[in-house]
Every structure is written in C-alpha cells, then in structure tokens.
Image (cartoon, rainbow, N blue to C red):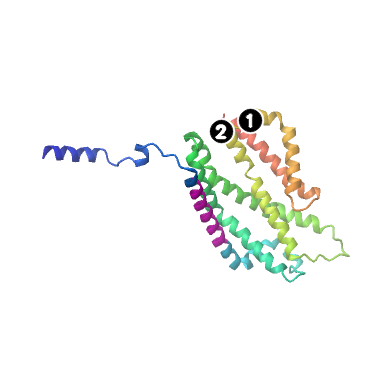
C-alpha cells in the first residue's frame, strides 16, 4: 500500500508530464517523409489560396469599386475586348486570394523549415511570419493611399484639354495590382535585412560601406518591377525603398 502511495505521489509531483519529443531525441526524417510533408504543406496552401480566391470572385464588385476610387472622377472604366472584363475579375479574385491566404502560406512554410533550424535561428526567424504579412499589407496600403493618387494625377496631367482619357479596365487593374504588389514586397526589405544581419549572414558595416552600390541596385530593381518604364514610376518605388534601406541600418545600429 505504501509503495502504491509513493508511486502516486511521485506521478503527481512530476505533473505535467514532459512531452515525448523532449524525452526522446528527435528522429531524422527520411527524404520520402520530407517530400510527403512538403506535399501536405503545398496542398494546404493551395486550398487556402483557392478558397480565398473564390471569395474574392464573389466580392469582385466592391473590390473593383475600391480600387477605382483614384480615377472615379473620370467616370466608368471601359473594356475593349470580350474577355477583358472576365479576366479583370479573375485578376481581382487572385489578388484577394493572395492577400487573404498569405498568413496560411507563410505559416505552412514556417512549419516546414522550422525543424531544420537551430534554436536561436527559430527565435530570430519565428516572428518573421506575422511581421512579413503586416509589412506586406502596410506596403500595399502606402501604395494605394500615397503613391497611386499621385501617379494617376501625374499621368492624367499630360492629357490636355483636347484629349479625353478613356481608361481600359484591364490596363488600369494591371497598373494598380503591379504597384500594390511591388510596394508590398518592397516594404519587407527592412525585416529581411535585419534578420540576415542578426543571423550573421550579412554584415551591417559592409552594407554601410557599399551604400552607393545598394542605391544603384535599388533603382535597377525599381526599374524592373514597376508596371511602366517611365522615370516617375521607378522613382515612386525606388525612393521609399532607399529610405527603408537607410532605416534598416539605423535600427541595426541602435540595437547593437
């Protein structure tokens, strides 16, 4: 009886029990198991994207009204081919699907790569999942509220009184989505650079010494990803990107 009581007290004293994976060493996964896990992660991400895109298809009308606000004074957008309006709606649905399903996709990517990282790497990279998404949304918001109205006014100012602007639905959406996505990706630069510096992959002092090279690369990158080839569109992306680069160096110096 006393032995049973002693065993019971020992169990209660050790509660809660340790997780099994903390008691036993982690088993190395085989290549087939890695591929199977990757397949599951991809399937979950694709299902999330498909479901969000379907929702975006049914919400395409209010989304389109929101996107066309900068050019609303010009009247209704037109389409000049049979499939232009249909493919424009699909573009809106896919953009909505990317934005809404991005947290799930980032989470699945994190769950796949996390087991292969060291503990300190997990701490540094772990908070990137929500931060990347928030920065992406922040970049899109900055592009929509700050850059897009300026770009619309600038380009329409070249019409003159003798030219009436008739904006095509497809071309306008291509310009807007390219601008939103470009700024969304651009705003993630500080976080990526900061994490690379913290992990020791990139040296902050080297980034400071190579500032001129970095600025040149930034303008080349902006020229490639902007929807048009004019200097104004390139500058709308390059100067905020340059500012974010400098901000990253400042934050890195302050956190030493």
69 shown above or below 207: below
Looking at the rendering, which quadrant does residue 62 occupy?
A: bottom right
* Residue at screen point 70% across, 54% down: 178
Label for residue 199? 2
Give residue 124's position: percent from left, percent from top: 52, 37
| Quarter of the image with the N terminus in it | top left
Number of numbered discs present?
2
Q: Is residue 105 magenta?
A: no
The residues bearing labels 1 and 2 have C-alpha atoms spaced at a distance of 11 Å
246 shown above or below 156: above
Q: Is residue 47 magenta?
A: yes
* Residue at screen point 51% across, 51% down: 41
Q: Nearer the viewer, mark 1 or mark 2?
A: 2
| Closer-to-camera residue (213/36) | 36
| Closer-to-camera residue (129/67) | 129
Looking at the rendering, which quadrant does residue 248 occupy?
A: top right
Q: Secondary structure at mark 2?
A: loop
35 shown above or below 60: above
Residue denoted by label 1:
204
Q: Secondary structure at mark 1?
A: helix
| Closer-to-camera residue (150/189) | 189
* Residue at screen point 51% across, 36% down: 121
* The residue stretch that appears in magenta: 34-52
**Label 2 crowd bin: few (<14), some (14–19), many (20+), radius 10 Å:** some
Looking at the rendering, which quadrant does residue 152 occupy?
A: bottom right
**Label 1 crowd bin: few (<14), some (14–19), many (20+), radius 10 Å:** many
Left or right: 102 in relation to 173: left
- Marks 1 and 2, the one that precedes in the sequence: 2
| Closer-to-camera residue (250/50) | 50
| Quarter of the image with the C terminus in it | top right
């Amino acid at each position: 009886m006393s032995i049973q009581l002693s065993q019971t007290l020992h169990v209660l004293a050790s509660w809660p029990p340790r997780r099994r994976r903390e008691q036993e060493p982690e088993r190395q996964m085989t290549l087939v198991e890695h591929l199977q896990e990757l397949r599951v992660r991809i399937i979950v991400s694709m299902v999330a994207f498909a479901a969000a895109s379907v929702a975006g298809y049914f919400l395409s009308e209010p989304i389109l009204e929101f996107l066309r606000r900068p050019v609303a004074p010009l009247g209704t957008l037109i389409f000049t081919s049979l499939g232009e309006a249909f493919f424009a709606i699909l573009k809106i649905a896919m953009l909505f699907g990317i934005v809404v399903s991005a947290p799930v996709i980032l989470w699945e990517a994190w769950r796949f790569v996390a087991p292969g990282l060291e503990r300190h790497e997990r701490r540094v990279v772990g908070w990137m999942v929500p931060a990347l998404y928030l920065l992406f949304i922040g970049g899109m918001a900055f592009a929509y509220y700050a850059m897009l109205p300026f770009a619309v006014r600038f380009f329409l100012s070249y019409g003159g009184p003798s030219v009436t602007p008739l904006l095509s639905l497809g071309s306008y959406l291509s310009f807007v989505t390219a601008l939103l996505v470009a700024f969304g990706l651009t705003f993630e630069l500080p976080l990526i650079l900061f994490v690379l510096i913290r992990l020791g992959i990139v040296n902050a002092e080297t980034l400071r010494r190579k500032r001129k090279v970095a600025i040149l690369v930034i303008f080349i990158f902006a020229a490639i990803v902007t929807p048009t080839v004019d200097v104004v569109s390139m500058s709308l992306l390059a100067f905020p990107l340059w500012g974010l680069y400098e901000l990253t160096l400042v934050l890195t110096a302050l956190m030493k």
